Amino acid sequence: MTPLDPATRSLPGEFQVHEPPEQLLPWRTAVLDRGSARRADPGHLESVLSRPSTRVMVMGRRETLIHEGRIVFLASGEIETVSEPSGPVIYLGSALAGSGLPDGTDVVLVGLADRPDPSTIPGVPDGTAWAGFREVATELPATDAGIFIEASAISNWHDTHRHCPRCGAATDVEQGGWVRRCPEDKSEHFPRTDPAIIVTVIGPDDRVLLGGSGAWDAKRYSTLAGFVEPGESLEQAVIREVGEEVGVTVHSPQYLGSQSWPFPASLMLGFTARTEDREATPDGVEVTRARWFSREELQAAVSSGEILISTPASIARALIEQWYGGPIVDRPVED
Ligand SMILES: [Zn+2]
């Protein structure tokens, strides 16, 4: 094995496909220490729930309690008074420095069968409302967004993986909600994440290729994206997806960064890739329009309202701005 060369952040030999990027995407440090060893201890969750300092995030139909752009956490003793839990209590982790919670505070997630009126929940401030991640993604601080994403990812997995894929028996939850085990054949099952590539395609004249789907607002343009298939490398997926969606042949795929997007279970792996092609032909299914933009054309089209691009909270926006070389100014919201 030849180790990674820290100077180039590239793999040697046959995997060497590109020069190191000038600018990587911004990334966030972890907010919670997930305690993967700790959560396997028998009685760990019971001990966490018995502590008054433990904070409880509740989730009903993929929404949580939000007040003034922050997640509202409940005290562990208040859960039974709120609503019937709809699944296992899940250990999300203990707060790290900078998380917005006191260091070491344990955070758990409880799924609720229904969503009671927030005004009826003890200790919840006036003006609290249920909200989904997409509704509040741009107003949440990165710390709360990180917790909401982790909670969404793990609860989506539990909602859709209640039975053993080998024999169909209902599985038991272990390790604070991070393992399900089959009581019949004892097989262990771990949370799933589906890798998907998302890519800026850069043309020979340095223009970027963005596309839109028929299901979207007709003005909306974004980076191309698609799921990685079994047996495929990320680089192969980039080349295949761009070829399928817009008929463009790309080379030199360059990894730039990632974003968890668990709606329901994606991990978005951000790339940029180059092409010598000047034409793009949408497949008419996943992509129904495609357009090249110079930097000046893109900023002008966004400023005039001619097109919409992804929100600043998204990896799509970060990828576009990595190509652009700085922030793109959105059109001011009209009253
Ligand atoms: Zn089984």
Image: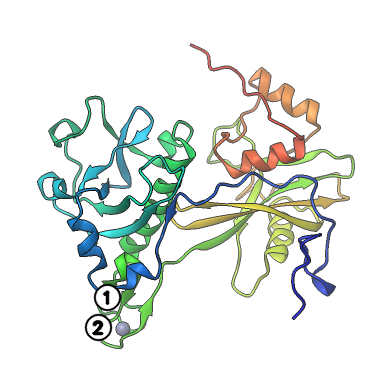
Kindly identify which residue carries mark 1: 171
Image location of residue 15, percent across then percent down: 79, 70
Does the numbered disc 2 mark a residue whose Cβ is under 8 Å from ligand 1? Answer: yes
Q: Residue at x 62, y 23 (%)?
A: 330
Residue 37 vs 48, above or below: the answer is below
- Do the numbered discs 1 and 2 sit on residues whose CB atoms are within 8 Å? yes
Disc 2 secondary structure class: loop
Query: Which residue occupies the foreground of this view, 15 or 194?
Result: 15
Q: Give the left or right position of residue 117, taking residue 322 as reference.
A: left
Q: Give the left or right position of residue 31, taking residue 131 as reference.
A: right
Q: Residue at x 70, y 36 (%)?
A: 321
Kindly identify which residue carries mark 2: 183
- Which quarter shows the N terminus? bottom right
Q: Residue furthest top?
A: 335
Classify 10 Å Cα crowding around label 1: few (below 14), some (14-19), many (20 and above): many
Q: Give the left or right position of residue 50, taking residue 15 as reference.
A: left
Image location of residue 314, percent across then percent down: 57, 41
Can I make out residue 161 in this image? no
Classify 10 Å Cα crowding around label 2: few (below 14), some (14-19), many (20 and above): few
